[in-house]
Image (cartoon, rainbow, N blue to C red):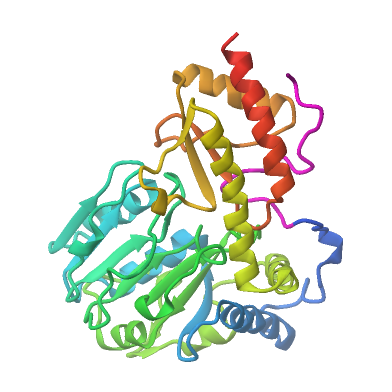
């Protein structure tokens, strides 16, 4: 039967993701608008974004947090161009973005000593093959596959290479072992529902040492430069960005951090995401025609939840269209490179009630395309 109610918030996109509940742009602190980002108030806001990120995430005191250009992609490219080449590189990839990093390392940087460990959509590669002497690159959560790593136990405590983690759809939603990670990148528009165009770069002391002792053999564009001479450009991590940021986006990000604190902090945000995943798990258990793309339950993402349906691609596309036409769910088709299916964002900006209602509509849409 056609459901009686619709989700109050139909935005289930996996990026940019839904704004937080109760969000109103009119409530942002906008005193920095129209001011230089290099003014005292501009730098103070940028510095606050970095320090509060560190505090809420509970990062080690000697980890640096900086705002960089071009979203998570910019942060990843910046660190790869600036640090890789000093050691052999192990790349673990099981979805689109991980494979993008592998492509850039082999075809753009053209590093010779690269070992790739690939997994099909729905599966992880064998992470235990990571060599502690090598630099290791991986995504914590495969945004386009709905597959995340269950823990960081496979990362050696005595490693001599760097671990570089693209954490953009995991951070603020999944427990992460900071001591096992030397570089962490993410963007505001994922778990926190912030605005795009800016990336966050987190560095451990090991990563800082690499930057200060290794000079890549290729030219580094200005927008990627993390050092001045042989020293880290500490200003980047104290509110002085490489290029001009959007102070409106910064205000939006600070609002998101306020919301996380009001929610109960990092643990509360993680718990909400897990509870949201529980709604979909219950639905999958009750319906034989739908399953998780992730083959191992321990690897099911709690943010970008990817589902397979026992339908041909055309019928799945029809379901997605029906749900959008009804104003029930926007942007929930699978990623263009992934197997046909549904991809539903379940981060903390999504309310459990809306997911429960969405499940009813998905069941309705399934019936409609099978009449």
Q: In this view, does 104 lie to the left or right of 338?
A: left
Residue 16 in view of the camera: no
Q: In this view, does 229 lie to the left or right of 67?
A: left
Residue 353 in view of the camera: yes
Q: In this view, does 342 lie to the left or right of 368?
A: left
Q: Which residue lies furthest to the front in this view?
A: 286
> Toward the viewer: 15 or 199?
15
**Is residue 259 positioned above or below 311 on the image?**
below
Quadrant (top left/top right/bottom left/bottom right) for the N terminus: top right
Span highlighted in magenta in the image? 1-20
Picture residue at 46% right of the left edge, 20% below the top: 311
- In the image, residue 214 lies at what x, y percent? 25, 83
Q: Does the magenta stretch include residue 45?
A: no
**Is residue 310 positioned above or below 58 on the image?**
above
Quadrant (top left/top right/bottom left/bottom right) for the C terminus: top right
**Is residue 36 positioned above or below 113 on the image?**
below
- In the image, residue 181 lies at what x, y percent? 37, 75
Picture residue at 72% right of the left edge, 32% below the top: 328
Q: Is residue 18 magenta?
A: yes
């Amino acid at each position: 039967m056609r459901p009686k109610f619709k989700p109050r918030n139909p935005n289930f996109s996996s990026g940019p993701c839904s704004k937080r509940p109760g969000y109103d742009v009119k409530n942002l602190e906008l005193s920095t608008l129209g001011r230089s980002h290099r003014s005292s108030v501009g730098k103070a806001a940028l510095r606050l974004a970095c320090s509060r990120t560190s505090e809420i995430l509970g990062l080690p005191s000697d980890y640096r947090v900086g705002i960089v250009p071009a979203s998570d992609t910019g942060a990843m490219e910046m660190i790869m161009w600036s640090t890789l080449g000093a050691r052999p590189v192990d790349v673990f990839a099981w979805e689109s973005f991980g494979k993008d990093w592998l492509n850039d390392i082999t075809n753009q940087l053209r590093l010779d000593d690269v070992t790739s460990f690939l997994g099909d959509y729905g599966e992880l590669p064998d992470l235990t093959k990571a060599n502690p002497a090598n630099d290791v690159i991986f995504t914590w959560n495969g945004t386009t596959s709905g597959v995340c790593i269950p823990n960081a136990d496979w990362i050696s405590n005595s490693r001599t290479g760097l671990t570089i983690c693209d954490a953009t759809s995991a951070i603020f939603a999944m427990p992460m072992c900071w001591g096992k990670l030397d570089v962490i990148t993410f963007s505001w528009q994922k778990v926190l529902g912030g605005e795009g165009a800016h990336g966050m770069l987190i560095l451990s002391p090991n990563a800082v040492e690499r930057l200060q002792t290794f000079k890549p053999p290729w030219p580094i564009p200005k927008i990627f430069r993390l050092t001045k001479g042989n020293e880290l450009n500490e200003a980047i991590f104290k509110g002085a960005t490489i290029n001009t940021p959007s102070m409106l986006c910064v205000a939006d990000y600070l609002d998101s951090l306020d919301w996380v604190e009001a929610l109960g902090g990092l643990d509360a945000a993680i718990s909400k995401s897990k509870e949201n995943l529980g709604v979909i798990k219950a639905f999958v258990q009750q319906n034989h025609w739908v399953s998780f793309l992730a083959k191992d339950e321990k690897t099911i993402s709690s943010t970008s939840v990817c589902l397979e349906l026992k339908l041909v691609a055309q019928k799945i596309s029809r379901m997605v269209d029906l749900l959008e036409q009804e104003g029930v769910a926007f942007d929930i088709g699978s990623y263009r490179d992934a197997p046909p299916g549904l991809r539903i964002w379940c981060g903390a900006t999504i309310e459990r009630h809306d997911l429960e209602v969405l499940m009813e509509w998905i069941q309705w849409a399934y019936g409609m395309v099978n009449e």
